[in-house]
Image (cartoon, rainbow, N blue to C red):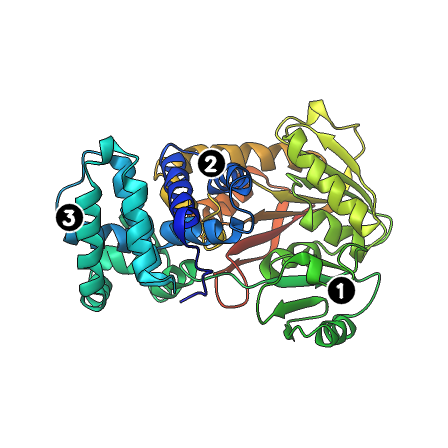
Amino acid sequence: MRRWLVFFGSCMSSIQQHAADILAAVEDGRTLTDALADAQQRLATEHAGSRGALQDIAYGVLRYRSELLWMLRHLVPRALPEPAVERLLLVALYQLVHTRAAAYAVVNETVNAAAHHAGGRFKGLVNGVLRNALRQKETLAEAAHNDPLARWNHPQWWVDRLRVAYPQDWQTVLAAGNTHPPMTLRVNHRHEAAADYAARLAQAGLECTVLDGQALMLARPVPVKELPGFADGLVSVQDWGAQQAAHRLQLADGQRVLDACAAPGGKTGHMLELADIELTALDIDAARLERVRENLNRLGLSALTVAADAARPDSFWDGRPYDRILADVPCSASGVVRRHPDIKWLRRPEDFALLARQQAAMVDALWGLLASGGKMLYATCSIFPEENRRQLDSFLSRHADATCEGDEQLLPGPRHDGFYYALLAKA
């Protein structure tokens, strides 16, 4: 269980209500990141210091949504006619089962929050349900673990697809998707080695593990302001799996490089740290492209940033071929669900056909921009074969001048999220 700062009185009640509102927004198709940002801004005007508690609850309920729904249906067999009260109950169940919040405060403040819905008609029911949940907490948790859907906390179609794709690893993949992600750092190659920065962290009282040449994994997450030299560009926060992209591109000084779908700029900065290249950072979203510029400014690096659609080269290409292209294509993001637990509830099976068409259109368009003898890295943060190996096989069948120099599926685990990489060489 995670530590959770206990808020009393109207503060906890307000946090619970904001968390329930976030759940409603996600159910309507909004991302957790956007819904949480708006809620935290509203909450900050009411109760300073409560942003972390709200984030923990919102992420936690979505991480354990199937389990919490199973418990709720065991306690209340039929869905309540007031969805807002059901969401409050899910929030409270998460607090009671997965946090150290004081049980009496959780129950009392959930009842107070329920008073603002349906004229307060459900206050008594909420009180009875939560007190019953407290009495049965251990039994409920054990029974939920024995229910497949509640145990895995993923949609059934998602579980079914993983069982087919990874008959030996599907349970490990699902379990990893319900964990808290590690905080991994990328030490700026232009400043110092990972071992030297690890010594800086030790002096600051921060324990870490060296993963490879420039990657460090912290024993516990901390705010970036606590990282020595972060503001000066000594280090960046980037998953170890994501750090593989720049290394696999085989960069060298003087190359002309395109980073397609560059935002928020982690891979962009990494490539510029590794070699003196002429880099264009492309993204269709002009607002997200600003984050790329901010990252590069902090690192003291520069690139040409262009807001355009990678699938339409006529909107940005100057006719000069690229030596290297990073095709970080739009995907289901199924490999990073522990960082974004809303993804597993927002995705639908029918999404993959559209994503496959977008991916194929993008890589076909980008292939025409690559110089003879150049290389393109196809990259996704997905674990589903239809976005990865099947997409690679289809691409190779369409392009006789393409050869694959190697591909790898990284499954989410203790040290990195899920990614797929395929390095394509142009004859």
Point out which mark residue 76 bears.
Answer: 3
Task: Report x, y in % for residue 239.
Answer: 60, 58
Task: Report x, y in % for residue 88.
Answer: 31, 44
Question: Image height check: is 179 above or below 65?
Answer: below
Query: Label 3 amino acid?
Result: Val
SS of the residue under disc 1: loop
Query: Label 1 amino acid?
Result: Pro
Of callouts 3 and 2, which one flags the residue occurring earlier in the amino acid sequence?
3
Query: Label 2 amino acid?
Result: Leu
Across the whole image, how many numbered discs are drawn on residues?
Answer: 3
Pick the front one: 383 or 151: 151
Pick the front one: 48 or 36: 48
SS of the residue under disc 3: loop
Mark 1 closeness class: few <14, some 14–19, many ≥20 residues within 10 Å: some
Of callouts 1 and 2, which one flags the residue occurring earlier in the amino acid sequence?
1
Residue 222 left/right relative to 58: right
Of callouts 3 and 1, which one flags the residue occurring earlier in the amino acid sequence?
3
Residue position for label 2: 355
Q: Quadrant for residue 225, please give it.
A: bottom right
Residue sitting at x 59%, y 62%: 183
